[in-house]
Amino acid sequence: MASKKNNHPQRIRSITEFHRVRGLPGPAHPLISVIDFGDIHQQSADTSMVLDFYSIAMKRNVGGKFRYGQQEYDFDEGVLFFVAPGQVFSVSSPKGELPQHSGWLLLLHPDFFWNTSLTKKIRQYEYFDYTVREALFLSDKEEAIMKQVIQHISEELRANIDKHSQTIVIAQVELLLAYGDRFYQRQFITRKISNHLVLDKLEKLLDDYFDNEALSGKGLPGVQYFADQLNLSLTYLSALLRSLTGQNTQQHIHEKLISRAKEKLTNTDLTVSEIAYELGFEHPQSFCRFFKNKTSLSPMKFRQSFN
């Protein structure tokens, strides 16, 4: 039975159901809830679930292991992470010990902010597509700021609901998300050394890919390939690269591709069709359009300029 449970995560369709499953009293509002982790009934067995609503969690002293997909991560430090609807995650406790969570959890159903400014704005926050290994590590000051916003939301939900309640809560959620965006940008800067190592690894992966004689059979390199090789999500990798180089992953790949094309046009006698094929283009016309779009010159015009 345990194996079956792991293969089929429990789907939690409502915030009220989440409260029931985790041994909590019913939520004050069916579409939004602020939970103290100290109040959650911890389970000793592996717990795997997928939520139909947004989850924003600040955890400390997790003690157990957190799993996204097939990979496990330890989080003994305090971290903030964002989970979008439909993402599978699980928590397990080592040797049957119950993790002593502390921190807070904000659950937000999309129906709560339907037809408000947040309906479209929430899609701007790429960190909902990050994985747990790309969580946000907050400074004490940043954590205090986030906690204060959460307290405002909690107090508003405990107050008498009136026609202003949703507007006020939505404004506080937007503030929380904006701070999340700011603090992620700070993290890209403060972790600059490790981030530059990622950039170095990407450069080596690109060089290895383009140096491979089988490139013509493999086709053009895709963003997903490099994200998988670097063990990062697509959105996190692009955000990291933008913070370092001003370019996203796709632009970075294209820059390397143009560089290799120029090298072959100026240092070899290969025809344009042969170069296109070697670089993974299925049709020479596609290569010519791509090259001209990036350099404002056709491959032949570029080659002639060096002769």
Image: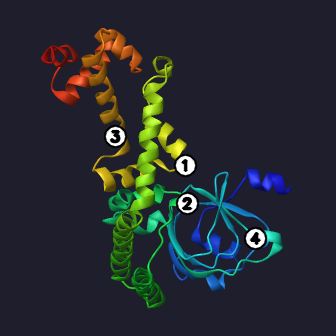
Q: Earlier in the sequence, mark 4 or mark 2?
A: 4
Disc 1 from disc 2: Cα separation: 9 Å
Give the residue pinned by disc 4.
93
> Residue 301, position in %: x, y?
15, 16
> Residue 112, position in %: x, y?
44, 69
Nearer to me, 65 or 161: 65
Report the mark closest to the observer, 4 or 1: 1
Q: Earlier in the sequence, mark 1 or mark 2?
A: 2
Nearer to me, 34 or 293: 293
Give the residue pinned by disc 3.
252
Residue type, mark 3 in image: His
Give the position of the N terminus as an image quadrant.
bottom right
Q: Earlier in the sequence, mark 4 or mark 1?
A: 4
Q: Which secondary structure, mark 2?
A: helix
Residue type, mark 4 in image: Ser
Report the mark closest to the observer, 4 or 3: 3
Residue type, mark 1 in image: Asn
Displayed quadrant of residue 114: bottom left
Q: Are marks 1 and 2 in contact (CB under 8 Å)?
A: yes
Label 1 environment density (alpha carbons within 10 Å; few <14, some 14–19, many ≥20): few
Label 4 environment density (alpha carbons within 10 Å; few <14, some 14–19, many ≥20): some
Nearer to me, 9 or 59: 59
Give the residue pinned by disc 1.
231
Q: Earlier in the sequence, mark 1 or mark 3?
A: 1
Disc 1 from disc 3: Cα separation: 17 Å
> Residue 225, position in %: x, y?
50, 37
Give the residue pinned by disc 2.
133
Q: Are marks 4 and 2 in contact (CB under 8 Å)?
A: no
Residue 27 seen? yes
Residue 101 sits above or below residue 307 on the image: below
Disc 4 from disc 1: Cα separation: 24 Å
Residue type, mark 2 in image: Arg
